[in-house]
């Protein structure tokens, strides 16, 4: 059986087995939101003479006047037809909001992950090659620093240094300078859209907006990636095949980068998947500090006001992405180490 | 030649748009744009939609016109709205009958909607019918001005509309100045009505049909709204278009970021920075702050008058005497506001306006005595709640309240609650006492009492229902004799001071921070920015 076929079969089985989990997530979030104290209808009854009549009006508008089992059935029916309800906070359908905001979060997360990996892998390898050396301690220090400093602190510090004092970063306000031309939306990823449209000025503007928030997030996830790389490399470097390789007189570079690294990558890939999913949902603070119009800050705003539909939609989206990421990770396992077959 | 990113971008944008503008020389420049940054977000273009945010109100003021509008006046050196000075916006003239019950509005002949069609009496009639009949926020508000049914509005001719009320209501005309009484292009909206939605509310949420000073160029809910000047606008005081060609109204959640943007000159205006930052910002000399006490708002500690032991007047009075007002004012607000405590009168106030400083003072001995009289010589246990969203100022206050009440043996636990949860608990009357800030659009004493100090609505925080207030306020509303009205107001204020359902603390400042070359800011009843007044000098 070819590799591709085996991967496809595995992916298909995984996708199928995730359906009950997704369903569980839907029902659980639905019930959880309704158990939480706080009545959204009361909160949104903001009119100058908000009385029972207005609260009732909003309750009906949000469909909260019906019994909960009926609400759940209606919700499930809506989901089946691709309707996730309407957000009270933005006044838009949740699907539209998520479609608009998910690319922003993804673009940021991918860039941050790229930053983090391009820094964590070399650092982890260097640290593993010279354990307990000055380099190792330096890497440990950098990682501890990245984890200890909360993202909103490092974010604000970066803004203060690069925008406020030095003036080399653009104003930290979202994905594109407000005065720059917005490229036509194709994928929602501004970097891709601008490149497709050939608007390189917009591309540059968008890329420069990305640097600081992505660096903030990368700093935060540097530790798990670098530490895991170091640990895995340490284990692999002492194994028999590395010794054999060295004994056979293979170059150091070839031993480390080809034989050792590839075998050490498995746990790093696992961590990468977890880090990615966490970043996507947990980068609320980065999104807030940099006014990034992403899904996480959207969900937080909704949660604070007990706006049910967006929170439910967000959790469903996250569950879905988590399933996808796990699937991708499994596929990557197969590529990194063909001996692995997770059924 | 120095070439920075912004010039380059502006240049590229100009080159890119030039073909479409037919080579128009006046390209959009930064100087003609006002960039307004705020922590809140616009969620609808129709301010009457239930759940509209305050930012949405602000945008609508600039996009839609009303028949009439508040003028402005100087108050301690700052411009503020003036409820007693009403000017025409779409109307060029309003005739009020001698009995104060019939209003004849003469529509400007040159008033045009954004699509170029003239504003007619039919549009006004349709818009007002919508305001009183549609399921929206408008009906409840303009009902406080005796506007309740479509029959009250009649068309006389294309440019004349008459509104009639049953009793002379002092708030009838002011209510038509509020942003709920906007005039829609009825022909345009009617194209989008459905049998389920006879007033086109689904469409107006994301689209506009107004005649105001600005049109909406782009609307990204929760992120930003860009407004473009309507050059044909005639509703201004001088009949000229607004000074700024373009307004960018952008949501920046982090207050520190907003402050840096303003200071760097990248943004032009913000009204919701941290009070603690304002002095430092101004001291650094690159920006100016226009600080106006929000004279139609007030912060208070509200007691739940329906929950023991706060149903006991003496307990409420005891707490009012135990609070260290000056420390609260310093810790919570950095003294950026106007005091509503330490009034020098007792019994009946000398002034009929409201809110005004109430005669509460920090007096621990008196507090102890009152608490003993109330039957709690050993105090009691309770909890004090505040809103997570206002933690920045409420948290230090809560700590001080806890400490001050410990001195009279009341043991207080502090609860910090998320927005939706605290609103629900207030409405269900489950909190013993809490801190809150609220606002009335129309700063008229009887209106304050009707909104905040009796009745079933959410804003009656203390759940206080004193029949005396109900009787006096309902009568005062229709009182045309100023002396009698003032007497009634003073009586209500005296009753409230005695009963202490809420303790008034202060009116927080609205701190509008802007670079020094921005001018014209006026404090509005809606606590938003009226971009039509703003200009670069």
Image (spheres, rainbow, N blue to C red):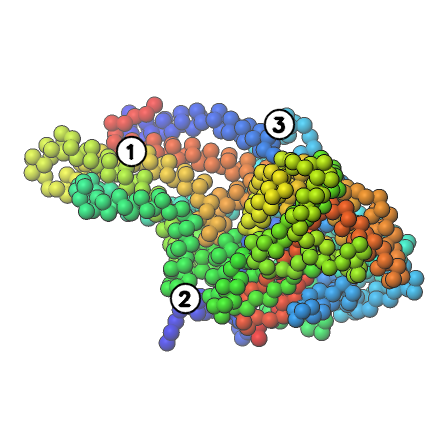
Q: Which of labels 2 and 1 is toward the front?
A: 1
Q: B86 or A63, which is in the foreground? A: B86
Q: B340 or A111, which is in the foreground? A: B340
Is disc 3 in contact with disc 2, using a CB cutoff of under 8 Å? no
Quadrant where the N terminus of chain B sits is bottom left
Label of residue A267 in the image? 1
Q: A31 or A309, which is in the foreground? A: A31
Residue at image mark 3: A73
- Asked if residue A93 can be seen in this view, the reply is no
Q: Neighbour class for label 1 at 10 Å: few (<14), some, many (≥20)?
A: some
Question: Which chain hosts label 1?
Answer: A
A79 relative position to A185: left or right: right
Quadrant where the C terminus of chain B sits is bottom right
Q: Secondary structure at mark 2?
A: helix
Q: Residue placed at 67% from the left, 69% from the top? A: B76
Q: B516 or A84, which is in the foreground? A: B516
A243 relative position to B70: left or right: left
Are labels 2 and 1 on one chain?
Answer: no
B243 relative position to A24: left or right: right
Question: Which chain hosts label 3?
Answer: A
Residue at image mark 2: B5
Are labels 3 and 1 on one chain?
Answer: yes
Q: Secondary structure at mark 1?
A: helix
């Amino acid at each position: 059986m070819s590799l591709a076929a085996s991967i496809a079969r595995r992916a298909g089985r995984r996708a199928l087995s995730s359906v009950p989990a997704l369903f569980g997530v839907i029902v659980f979030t639905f019930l959880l939101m309704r158990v939480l104290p706080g009545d959204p209808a009361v909160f949104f009854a903001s009119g100058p003479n908000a009385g029972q009549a207005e609260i009732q009006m909003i309750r009906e508008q949000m469909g909260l006047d019906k019994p909960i089992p009926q609400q759940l059935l209606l919700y499930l029916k809506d989901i089946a037809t691709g309707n996730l309800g309407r957000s009270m906070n933005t006044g838009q359908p949740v699907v539209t909001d998520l479609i608009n905001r998910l690319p922003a979060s993804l673009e940021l997360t991918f860039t941050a992950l790229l930053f983090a990996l391009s820094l964590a892998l070399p650092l982890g390898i260097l640290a593993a090659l010279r354990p307990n050396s000055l380099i190792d301690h330096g890497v440990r220090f950098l990682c501890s620093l990245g984890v200890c400093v909360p993202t909103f602190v490092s974010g604000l510090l970066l803004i203060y240094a690069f925008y406020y004092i030095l003036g080399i970063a653009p104003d930290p306000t979202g994905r594109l300078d407000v005065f720059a031309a917005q490229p036509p939306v194709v994928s929602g990823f501004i970097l891709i859209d601008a490149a497709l449209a050939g608007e390189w000025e917009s591309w540059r503007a968008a890329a420069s907006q990305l640097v600081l928030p992505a660096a903030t997030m990368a700093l935060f996830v540097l530790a798990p990636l670098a530490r895991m790389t170091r640990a895995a490399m340490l284990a692999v470097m002492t194994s028999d095949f590395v010794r054999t390789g060295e004994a056979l007189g293979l170059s150091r570079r070839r031993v480390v980068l080809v034989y050792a690294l590839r075998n050490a990558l498995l746990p790093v890939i696992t961590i990468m998947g977890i880090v990615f999913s966490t970043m996507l949902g947990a980068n609320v603070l980065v999104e807030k500090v940099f006014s990034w119009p992403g899904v996480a800050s959207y969900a937080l705003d909704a949660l604070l006001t007990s706006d049910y539909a967006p929170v439910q939609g967000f959790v469903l989206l996250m569950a879905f992405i988590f399933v996808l990421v796990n699937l991708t990770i499994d596929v990557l396992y197969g590529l990194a180490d063909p001996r692995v077959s997770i059924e | 030649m120095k070439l920075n990113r912004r010039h380059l971008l502006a240049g590229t944008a100009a080159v890119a748009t030039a073909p479409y503008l037919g080579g128009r020389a006046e390209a959009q420049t930064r100087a003609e744009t006002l960039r307004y940054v705020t922590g809140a977000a616009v969620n609808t273009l129709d301010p009457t939609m239930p759940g509209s945010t305050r930012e949405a109100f602000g945008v609508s003021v600039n996009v839609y016109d009303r028949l009439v509008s508040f003028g402005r006046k100087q108050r301690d050196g700052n411009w503020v709205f003036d409820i007693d000075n009403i000017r025409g916006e779409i109307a060029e003239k309003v005739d009020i009958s001698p009995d104060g019950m019939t209003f004849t509005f003469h529509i400007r002949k040159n008033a045009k909607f954004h699509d170029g069609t003239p504003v007619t009496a039919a549009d006004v009639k349709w818009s007002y019918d919508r305001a009183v009949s549609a399921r929206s926020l408008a009906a409840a508000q303009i009902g406080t001005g005796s506007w309740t049914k479509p029959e009250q509005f009649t068309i006389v001719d294309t440019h004349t509309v008459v509104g009639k009320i049953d009793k002379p209501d002092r708030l009838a005309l002011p209510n038509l100045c509020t942003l709920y009484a906007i005039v829609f292009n009825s022909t345009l909206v009617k194209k989008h009505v459905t049998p389920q939605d006879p007033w086109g509310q689904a469409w107006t949420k994301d689209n506009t049909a107004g005649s105001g000073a600005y049109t909406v160029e782009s609307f990204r809910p929760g992120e930003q709204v860009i407004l473009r000047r309507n050059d044909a606008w005639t509703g201004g005081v001088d009949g000229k278009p607004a000074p700024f060609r373009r307004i960018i109204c952008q949501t920046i959640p982090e207050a520190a970021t907003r402050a840096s943007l303003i200071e760097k000159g990248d943004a032009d205006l913000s009204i919701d920075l941290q009070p603690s930052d304002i002095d430092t910002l101004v001291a650094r000399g690159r920006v100016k702050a226009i600080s106006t006490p929000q004279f139609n708002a007030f912060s208070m500690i509200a007691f739940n008058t329906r929950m023991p032991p706060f149903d006991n007047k003496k307990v409420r009075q005891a707490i009012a005497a135990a609070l260290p007002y000056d420390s609260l004012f310093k810790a919570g607000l950095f003294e950026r506001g106007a005091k509503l405590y330490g009034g020098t009168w007792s019994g009946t106030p000398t002034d009929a306006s409201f809110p005004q400083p109430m005669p509460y003072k920090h007096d621990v001995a008196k507090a102890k005595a009152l608490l003993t009289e109330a039957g709690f010589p050993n105090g009691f246990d309770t909890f004090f709640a505040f809103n997570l969203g206002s933690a920045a100022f409420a948290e230090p206050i809560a700590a001080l309240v806890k400490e001050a009440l410990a001195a009279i043996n009341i043991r207080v636990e502090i609860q910090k609650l998320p927005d939706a949860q605290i609103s629900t608990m207030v409405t269900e009357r489950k909190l013993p006492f809490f801190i809150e800030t609220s606002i009335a659009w129309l700063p008229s004493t009887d209106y304050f009492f009707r909104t905040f100090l009796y009745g079933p609505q959410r804003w009656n925080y203390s759940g206080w229902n004193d029949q005396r207030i109900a009787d006096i306020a309902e009568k005062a509303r229709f009182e045309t004799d100023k002396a009698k009205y003032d007497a009634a107001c003073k009586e209500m204020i005296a009753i409230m001071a005695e009963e202490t359902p809420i303790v008034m603390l202060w009116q927080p400042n609205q701190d509008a921070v802007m670079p020094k070359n921005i001018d014209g800011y006026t404090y509005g009843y809606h606590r938003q920015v009226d971009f039509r007044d703003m200009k670069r000098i």
